[in-house]
Image (tube, rainbow, N blue to C red):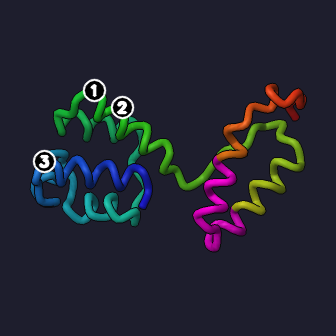
Amino acid sequence: MSPFAYQLRKIRTERQLQQKVMAEIIGCEPSYLSALETDSKVPPQKEKLIQFLKKMSLSSEQMAELLSAAEKSRRSIRLPLKAETEVFEVCHALEDQLPNISRIQLELIGLVLRINSTDLGVPKM
């Protein structure tokens, strides 16, 4: 489940709302809300999402969490224009492995990504 789907469902269930009622509040079809909660649809564009969030009367903290979750739930990434060949190769190798990646592999990748290369004395690519 994507971070966005998780947060959206959490907000709805905390408010004890059925999908139909929440869909009415934000102005969409219940099937669309269901698709968002089950990752069948990607989060809406930021402008549309902000319109939904305003209708939900969220706290600024909840709004920030849902916007952040939507960003983290994107299905594609953009590589820098002048990315090194190795960056492309690593990204595509990761893409190939994603369907079979294990929890420990994800945790190890996360740890590696938190290492600051300047702390190691390694120049940036």
Q: In the figure, residue 32 lies in which quadrant?
A: bottom left
* 64 and 14: which is toward the camera: 14
Are there few (<14), some (14-19), or many (20+) residues within 10 Å of tag 2? few
Residue 110 place in picture, x, y as percent = 64, 48
| Label 3: element kind | loop
* 34 and 96: which is toward the camera: 96
Which quarter shows the C terminus? top right
Who's the residue at 18% across and 54% down the image?
13
Which secondary structure class fits the magenta region best? helix
Q: Earlier in the sequence, mark 3 or mark 1?
A: 3
Tell me: residue 96, above or below residue 6: below
Q: CA distance from mark 1 to mark 2?
A: 6 Å
Q: CA distance from mark 2 to mark 3?
A: 18 Å
Which residue in the structure is indicated by mark 1? 60
Which residue in the structure is indicated by mark 2? 64
Q: Amino acid at mark 2?
A: Ala
Who's the residue at 89% across and 48% down the image?
85
Which residue in the structure is indicated by mark 3? 15
